Image (spheres, rainbow, N blue to C red):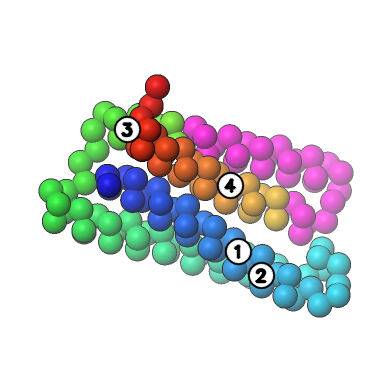
Amino acid sequence: MAFEEKRAWAMAVVAVLAYAVYVVLVLGRADGRALAEVPYAGTALWTIGAAVVVGIVAGIWFGIASRREGGPQADERDQEIGRFGDHVGQSFVVIGGVAALALAMAEVAHFWIANVLYLCFVLSAVFGSMAKIAAYRRGLR
């Protein structure tokens, strides 16, 4: 498995797990209240921060492991797959931005705006990573 494919797997798994922890914690705090009234900012910051740290550590770990196999050497194919995955992922960032803008214009509670953005960032990481993994497994056309 290529170094970049391993990183894509790590990013997808970390993003899903961090978001799942966030959702469980926020829903657990609801306790019969409306979701928009639940404190979420601290939980969001901690889960996002933890995901970033775990992603960096995973990248370092895969980099060290790949040195033993000859080192992480990105060729033209790796670069093209990286661009393809990034384009897929960026589409969800744009969707999140447009959705957040629409929610802000409708004067929806900050909770919903923040959660739409967080969800779209997670979807960006997951679908971008899945696109990269699929391209490594099936090739680009």
Residue wearing tag 4: 123
Nearest the camera: 44 or 82? 82
C-alpha span from label 2 to label 1: 6 Å
Q: Is 45 left or right of 36, judged from the image as shown?
A: left
* Dot placed on the residue nearer the N-terminal end, 4 or 2: 2
Mark 3 lies on residue: 79
Residue designated by label 1: 20
- Kind of residue sitting beneath label 4: Leu
What is the quadrant of the C terminus in the image? top left
As helix, strand or loop, the secondary structure at mark 3 comes to helix
In the displayed structure, 58 sits above or below 129; it is below
Q: Which residue is mark 2?
A: 24
**Residue 58 vs residue 35: left or right?**
left
Q: Which residues are magenta?
A: 86-114
Q: Give the number of the disc on residue 113.
A: none
Q: Are marks 2 and 1 in contact (CB under 8 Å)?
A: yes
Q: Residue at x 47, y 59 (%)?
A: 14
Q: Nearer the viewer, residue 2 or 122?
A: 2
Residue drawn where x is 52% and y is 56% of the image: 15
Question: Would you identify the image quadrant in which residue 94 lies?
Answer: top right
